[in-house]
Image (spheres, rainbow, N blue to C red):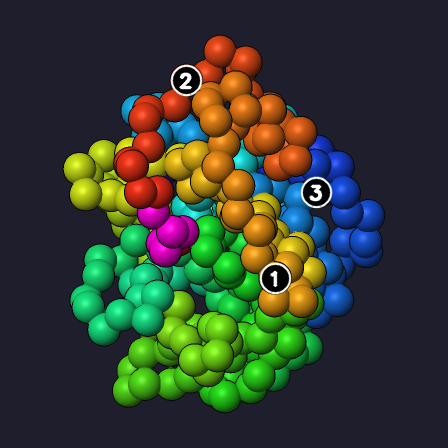
Amino acid sequence: MRRQRHQHHPDLDAYFARIGWSGERAPTWATLRSLHLAHVVGIPFENVEVVLGGVPSLEPADLEDKLVRQGRGGYCFEHNLLFAGVLEALGFGVTRLAARVRMGSDAIRPLTHILLAVEVPGEAHPYIADVGFGSGGLLEPLPLLPGVSSPQGAWRYRLVREDDRWLLQTVYGDDGWFTVYEFTLQRRELVDYEVANWYVATHPGSPFRHTLRVQRSGPHERAYVVGRLLTVVRSDGSTEERRLADDHEVLRLLVRDFGLLLPWDTAFPEPPERPERPEEN
């Protein structure tokens, strides 16, 4: 007998206030597109809970409390499960999927990323939505069609078929199209994400366990904190890097510029001598 979970009804008013959205509450392409962008811009990607030794809860009520009411962000499982619940409450059809992060590599990595296939009433094809990728992910949904280049602010994306897999690609510097992750259209269950979430939060080799990673995205600028290195990438191709001196400077930045509500006595583990680049979800 399958375990039954308590059904959660998302507080749409609180969620929309959190992301600063006031559009039409109807399951249309325009709603999906504007909600996706507002979420990405409004709620940062961050792994503070994990780097401090915790494992994020994926229960819908807990996700809403953390990302909406507490003024926090999260990583992929938190963002996309929260977003899926909101979309379903609005009348969209949502299939939860899983991806292997590639970031240009051909290595076979575990299924540690969540994304969504969203059905919009009246549309001939689904859309891929992903508001929780922490290294230059989508700003807007992509049509689930092969080879369609989608400009999104200063960036471009497309989906490519490779046998039974789909590849999400973006233009990366002067090297042309770059594979971000691969996925299939197999539906996943919450228990699948609970296992992946535990692995990502606790495995000694996880890039999220030992190094602070925070990102805030917009159409023309992306800002990353990795360890104590702040990197800002702008639409004109310029990049700015600044070393943060200590936890106090990190906290001031996260509160002032990233909009995260964190206790002032938060102390992060010492970052590696050479901070990693943001290379995972």
Q: Which residue is labeled 3 in the image?
A: 19
* Closer-to-camera residue (24/256): 256
Q: How many marks?
A: 3
Looking at the rendering, the stretch of residues picked out in magenta corresponds to 276-280
Residue at (60, 24) in percent of width and height: 252
Residue 267 shows which numbered tag?
Answer: 2
Q: Nearer the viewer, mark 2 or mark 3?
A: 2
Q: Is residue 31 left or right of residue 132?
A: right
The residue type indicated by label 1 comes to Ser
Q: Residue at x 75, y 67 (%)?
A: 30
Which is more toward the observer, 278 or 69? 278
Secondary structure of residue under mark 2: loop
Among numbered discs 3 and 1, the one appearing first in the sequence: 3
Residue 175 visible from this viewpoint: yes
Above or below, 242 against 166 in this view is above
Q: CA distance from mark 1 to mark 2?
A: 31 Å
Q: Quadrant of residue 107?
A: bottom left
Q: Tag 2: Cα neighbours inside 10 Å, few (<14), some, or many (≥20)?
A: few
- Label 1: element kind: loop
Residue type for callout 2: Ala
Amino acid under disc 3: Ile
Magenta stretch: helix, strand or loop mostly: loop
Label disc, if present, on residue 238 of the rendered structure:
1
- Quadrant in which residue 129 is drawn: bottom right
Earlier sequence position, callout 1 versus callout 2: 1
